[in-house]
Image (cartoon, rainbow, N blue to C red):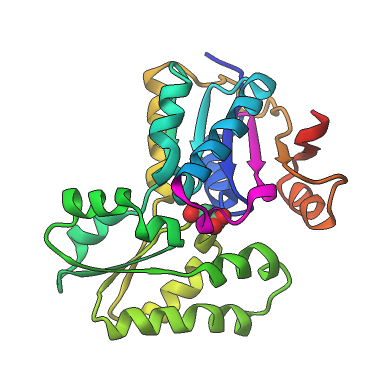
Amino acid sequence: MDGRPLLFLDSGIGGIPYCLDFSLANPGEPVVYAADRLHFPYGKRGKDDLVSIVLSLMGRLVPLVDPKLVIVACNTASVSALDGLREAFPGLPFVGTVPAVKPAAAGSKKRKIGVLGTERTVEGEYLAGLIRTYGNGCDVTALAAPDLVEFVEHRYTGSGAEERRNAVLPWVRRFRDAGVDALVLGCTHFLFLRDEFRREAAPGITVYDSVSGVSGRAAALFDERDLRAGVPPGAGKKPGLLVITGAEAPESSWLRWADYLGFRLALLEDM
Ligand code: DGL
């Protein structure tokens, strides 16, 4: 048993759906969520830049948080820096979040799949490798949607149904025009729009994501390595912690997220 927290990392709010999914299935597990808003958006950065940002952030967080496992709840950071993280922190298990190419390629009858991600993810070597290994010979249309990342990060809260629908529609249209019947949400921010994607993509296009795969992988590692906190049901758990980088004072949008999650908000600089 291990009462240390599980650490989630993203450039912003993208990892929150992953954090909620995991926490729902594993109540009693203490959680820290780190949002590197100072370096948002990750998707516009080159690989070397991103590797050094993520490694140095982890170098600050690990001694402060002492996590038992890290979920890199960001495709962009995972495809760029996962190897570097594992090398730099041997003994600390990392679960990455990468586009769900394998199930999408297995499920595609037309053998045409789409991947929607950030520039860094869709142009990077990691996705090309995933497609070679798990693409099942499918044609892959990979598109970058930086505007959609910005929409989720800055305008999702408070947006109306019509606005959300209009945000996903042009992307669904492009994939439909490309003839795909399987669409991978390859950026964690897009999980906030999963219902909209599913609605607009039906009929004909099935939407895939990595949420349950990531939670399942983390839970399996918990069991393999005896990492569960072992809090008895109903005993209550430590409140989570939401850490943000680069802010001089708690910002109202992040205070609202902390409130929504029931987490305490901390500025990395003050920890
Ligand atoms: N949420 C991140 C991902 O899954 C990236 C967003 C960004 O560009 O910072 O790729």
Residue 140 located left or right of residue 137 = right
Task: From the top left corner, tell me how far across and down residue 17 is, in percent.
Answer: 56, 52
Residue 26 located left or right of residue 150 = left
Magenta segment: does it hold 52? no
Picture residue at 41% right of the left edge, 47% below the top? 212
Is the residue 268 above or below the residue 132 in the image?
Answer: above
Task: From the top left corner, tell me how far across and down residue 81 is, in percent.
Answer: 44, 38
> How many marks on residues?
0
Q: Residue furthest right?
A: 249
Picture residue at 79% right of the left edge, 34% below the top? 269
Residue 99 seen from this side: yes
Residue 265 located left or right of residue 61 = right
Task: From the top left corner, tell me how far across and down residue 42 is, in percent.
Answer: 55, 53
Picture residue at 81% right of the left edge, 50% below the top? 255
- Residues drawn in magenta: 29-47
Residue 49 located left or right of residue 186 = right
Picture residue at 73% right of the left edge, 43% below the top? 244
- As rendered, which of 107 and 84 lies closer to the eye? 84
Residue 215 seen from this side: no
Q: Residue furthest left?
A: 137
Image quadrant holding the C terminus, namely: top right
- As rendered, which of 24 and 8 lies closer to the eye? 8
Task: From the top left corner, tell me how far across and down residue 147 is, in percent.
Answer: 56, 72
- As rendered, which of 192 and 41 lies closer to the eye? 41
Q: Residue 238, located in which quarter of the rendered image?
A: top right
Is the residue 44 above or below the residue 235 in the image?
Answer: below
